[in-house]
Amino acid sequence: MPTIHPDQQPAPRHDLSDAVTVFVTTVGAPTFERCLRHLREQDCTFRLEIIDYVAPMNVAFQRMLDGCRTRYYVQVDEDMILHPHAVRTLYETIEAAGPGVALFVGELYDVHLQRCIHGVKIFRHELVRGHPLAACRAFELEQIAHLERAGHQIVMTVCGPRPVQGRTLGLHGTQWTPRSVYERYGTLERSRRARPSRPQWFAEYGAEFLRRFSEDPSEQNFYAIMGVIAGVIASRNGEAGAKDYRKYDLLPGFDALQQFLEEVRTGAAQRPRERSSAARPKARAGRRKNVQR
């Protein structure tokens, strides 16, 4: 076994277990185990709690606020794959920002959108615990508005199209199912249209997803553009309530799209056989003519 020189010893992990609790919400997404693995690889220690199969989403997030016993807590969704420095960076940033900062929002690089987005968050529990989460789709924005009216500060990174080393804290959107990609982009489009005052960065993605599908008509690209279209239609009814995984099986239009794709696949599989059988009699007739000559 090779000898490790003292200068090569791994740096000790920062012990934040008395200061930070990391809460992970899960409803069984395929990225959950990978998410946990990357949390175990952080360069600091902390308390870890799993909130599994709690819905709607505002109720799951309220569990964090009610159950936190440390000065700070970090909200991690199961589709977030954090870099090893992420939790420590969140803690150091909100500590340095001062006691009036209630929330710091870090950025993640979304692999499917191919841009950075606001994602992982750290809360100063002392300030946010008096501001519960409302039962509405935009419950996080409502809480932020309440915090700001109370005189507390919110700090967010300025997201750009490319990740920035040290500042970008991980990845998002690394793995999708047809249902999840359809739900996500339907939700984003519906929310964007329901709140015109919000940043409109997602507005360009209808055209972008259509371009991707025209170049690569994959199942994922199909459900992405169909999700945007579903969001346009649903926006006529205003903004939806808080996300609820128990209703994912009832996504409007999704079952019809699945049936449409299956019919397209079935028809495409049958057409070559039909063309082949239609060509055979002509070929036989041609051979008979040759024999008669």
Image: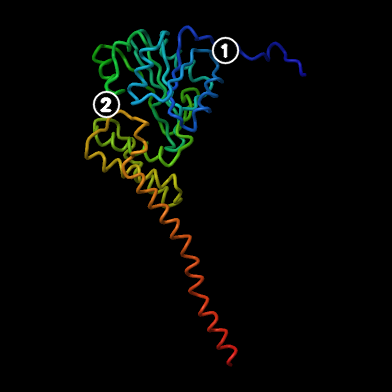
x, y (%) of residue 261? Answer: 41, 52
Task: Specify the quadrant of the image occupied by residue 51.
Answer: top left
Is 100 above or below relative to 28? above
Is 148 above or below relative to 199? above
Camera-side residue: 273 or 85? Answer: 273
- Circle on res. 13: 1
Q: Residue at x 48, y 35 (%)?
A: 174
Is 282 above or below relative to 276? below
Camera-side residue: 280 or 192? Answer: 280
Task: Specify the quadrant of the image occupied by residue 205.
Answer: top left
Q: Earlier in the sequence, mark 1 or mark 2?
A: 1
Left or right placement of residue 234 versus residue 267 in this view: left
For mark 2, give the secondary structure: loop
The C terminus: image quadrant: bottom right
- Circle on res. 65: none
- Circle on res. 136: 2
Q: CA distance from mark 1 to mark 2?
A: 39 Å
Task: Specify the quadrant of the image occupied by residue 199.
Answer: top left
CB within 8 Å, label 1 to label 2: no
Left or right placement of residue 213 versus residue 165 in this view: left
Outermost residue toward the right in this view: 1
x, y (%) of residue 239? Answer: 25, 33
Q: Amino acid at mark 2?
A: Cys
